[in-house]
Amino acid sequence: SGQLFQGYGTHFVDLWVGYPEPQRQTLIVDTGSSITAFPCDPCPDCGQDYHTDQDYKDEESTTFHLEPCDSCELGRCKHVDEFKYCAVSMAYAEGSAWFAYEATDLAYFGGHHSAPERKDRRLQRNRNLRHLASASD
């Protein structure tokens, strides 16, 4: 279980992603959407001034795996030059939007807000979590 934090007009939770050193991604609890995403490095147009955490660095996780096109569950296969990925997007009524790709990694909700729990104990209890990492489209 994870702690639910109250922000200005919203609620959020901490998701710790990656191994061997989990990276915190603070996610808005959006009851009106079925999916969510967080910024990935590099993403120059992902609103760095508005996010609590640093962009997720997938190259620092030994358990990160980009989903191939034949494994798309939430989006559709997209081709950019030789690069193929599962593209997902969400647009909101107030005009904002995000574009992402599907990936899996080890992850857990909760723990201390300022530092990850010791890696092996929590991460071994949790299976791979499919997550969305934001990317410019």
Image (cartoon, rainbow, N blue to C red):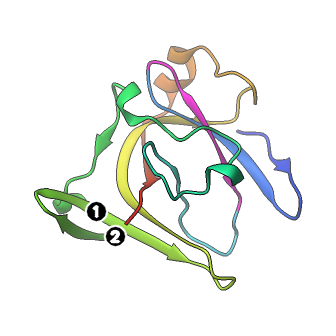
Percent of width and height locating residue 85:
24, 59
Residue toward you, 27 or 43: 43
Q: Main secondary structure of the magenta part?
A: strand
Q: Quadrant of residue 100?
A: bottom left
Percent of width and height locating residue 102:
36, 56
Q: Which residue matches tag 1?
A: 86
Q: Check residue 112 for magenta coloring.
A: no
Q: Is residue 121 above or below residue 131?
A: above
Residue at screen point 80% across, 47% down: 4
Q: The residue under label 2 is which amino acid type?
A: Gly
Residue at screen point 79% across, 40% down: 3
Which residue, as the protein is rendered here, is positioned at the far left? 82
Residue at screen point 44% across, 71% down: 89
118 left or right of 12 in image: left
How far apart are labels 1 and 2 at the CA level?
A: 6 Å
Magenta-highlighted residues: 20-29
Residue 94 disc label: none
Residue at screen point 35% across, 49% down: 103
Does residue 25 appear anywhere in the picture?
yes
63 left or right of 93 in image: left
Q: Is residue 130 above or below residue 53?
A: below
Q: Which residue matches tag 2?
A: 75
